[in-house]
Amino acid sequence: QVQLVESGGGLVQAGGSLRLSCAASGRTIWTNAMAWFRQAPGKEREFVAAISWNGGSIYYADSVKGRFTISRDNAKNTVDLQMNSLKPEDTAIYYCAISRRLSTTADLGAYNYWGQGTQVTVSS
């Protein structure tokens, strides 16, 4: 049984920073791409960032490019999301996910394990 547990969410003012972390247990994640998605109230879940199995390929949504940085530590079975210059429109529940693939993808259907999410709220 794979478990993903996100942490690091909270309330921050616009322009501030947060660092999200996702810890995997039940299996190693070094053979799979990982990603962060988010879902705001009343909206569909959307792609944020993905990182390939070895960190060699990284892909960001245009809305976060230049502000967010995804990274992973396969030895620790973790993937992080550093979020800088946060905006009110970044407010959402953030989820980490494990892909069936080695390479990065924004396709939500490619991800077969999900965490429970962590709330990020950015005040204006």
Image (tube, helix red, strand yellow):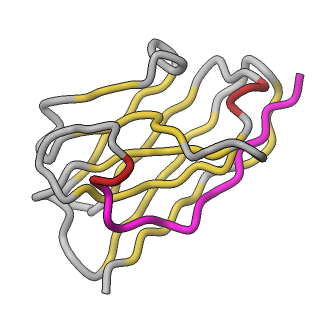
For the point 46% across and 37% down, the residue is 47
Q: Is residue 69 left or right of residue 17?
A: left
Q: Nearer the viewer, residue 111 or 72?
A: 111
Q: How many marks?
A: 0
Considering every residue shown, the one lying at the far top of the view is 66
Residue 70 in the image, given as x and y percentages of width and height: 37, 35
| Residue 106 versus residue 28 in the image, above or below | above
Could you tell me residue 30's position as x and y percent?
A: 14, 58
Q: Is residue 119 magenta?
A: yes
Left/right placement of residue 115 relative to residue 73 reads: right
Given residues 19 and 121, the one toward you in this image is 121
- State the residue at coordinates (32%, 79%): 2
Q: Could you tell me which quadrant the N terminus lies in?
A: bottom left
Who is closer to the viewer here, 70 or 105? 105
Please tell me whether the stretch drawn in magenta is mainly helix, strand or loop. Answer: strand
Residue occupying the far bottom of the picture: 1
Residue 93 % position (x, y): 66, 50
Look at 52% across and 21% down and name the residue there: 64
Which residue does the image show at 17% across and 37% down from the upper left? Answer: 55
Quarter holding the C terminus is top right
Give the percent coordinates (x, y) of residue 98: 30, 59
Can you tell which quarter of the image residue 113 is in?
A: bottom left
The residue range painted magenta reads 111-124
